[in-house]
Image (cartoon, rainbow, N blue to C red):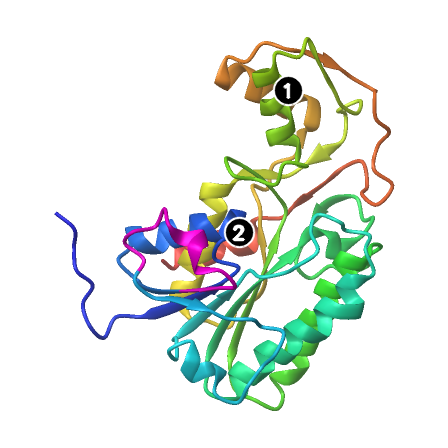
Amino acid sequence: MIQRREKGLMKVAVTGASGFIGQYVLNELEKRKIETIAITRNANNFNNFPWLKDIIEFDISNPKPDDFETIHRPDVLIHLAWDGLPQYKSNRHFEIELLKQYNFLKNLIQNGLSSLIVTGTCFEYGMQYGELREDFPTLPNNPYGYAKDALRRQLEFLQSELKFSLTWTRLFYTYGEGQHQGSLYPQLKEAVLRGDPTFNMSGGEQLRDYLPVEEIARLIVLIACKKANFGIVNICSGTPVSIRYLVERWLRENQWKISLNLGHYPYSDYEPMAFWGSREKLNGILKTM
């Protein structure tokens, strides 16, 4: 039996709802029977979500004074939308996206939005090594990380003028079904399905912090439900893992058979060899739930 949502429960809007993480966030909200508003440029993206009743076609590039009314005055906005990925080095992130994103969010806040969750990126930390805490300085060294960090700072400045809660969920690495085909996990899966004898990759010794997309969506929704002003929160495992170990684990878990051609690609020039997130703040928040 499908439970009906009770009137008066929290209403959550999601931008970027048809994206990789967005679809998992929608499913997590549905599990909790939270009234959900999916904001998208194309309502046809939600044909596989028959339970989703509130879908709003909307372009955040052209903010209007009645936008908050148009998206049905949510209690919380989970803002996942960001164009231009995964081209992290494209200047469009600060030339186009930054201003577009800020104007859209400021307009909603001016017209009544009281709680905002925005996804940031571990690239805001730049080339810093080791365990990264939320109170570390931001030193982004690619346009995407720079633009995300600038948006966070703009929103923090805006809090001195307008009253609203802001949580900046700084995402590390994710994987799962539906991920962009240029990412490591889908590339590996596609190579196996094609029957390739080998999979080309880097040396695999770099240490990263990975979480499955289902867990990232769960954490974002848990935080959103608090409607609190948490500031920056790392969304991470807190445990470094080498890329080689991670790929070998995926092979074991899925019983995939393919040889790894290690060292075929050079290591990235915009990421340090070893970094992962501190989970101390996140764990503290979770203990209150």
Judge from the rendering whether residue 45 lies leftward or rightward of residue 260; answer left or right.
left
Q: Which residue is mark 2?
A: 19
Residue 279 on image: x %, y %: 57, 48
Q: Residue at x 40, y 53 (%)?
A: 46
Residue in front for this viewpoint, 130 or 116: 116
| 87 drawn magenta | no
The C terminus sits in image quarter: bottom left
Mark 1 vs mark 2: which is more N-terminal?
2
In the rendered image of this protein, does residue 14 appear above or below residue 268? Answer: below
Q: Identify the residue under disc 1.
A: 191
> In the image shown, does 265 or 240 lie closer to the viewer?
265
Q: Say what secondary structure mark 1 lies in.
A: helix
Q: Quadrant of residue 95?
A: bottom right
Query: Residue at horizontal 64%, vertical 39%?
Result: 209
Residue 49 shown in magenta = yes
The stretch of residues the image draws in magenta is 38-52
Amino acid type assigned to the residue bearing label 1 in the image = Ala
Kind of residue sitting beneath label 2: Gly
Q: CA distance from mark 1 to mark 2?
A: 23 Å
Q: Secondary structure at mark 2?
A: loop
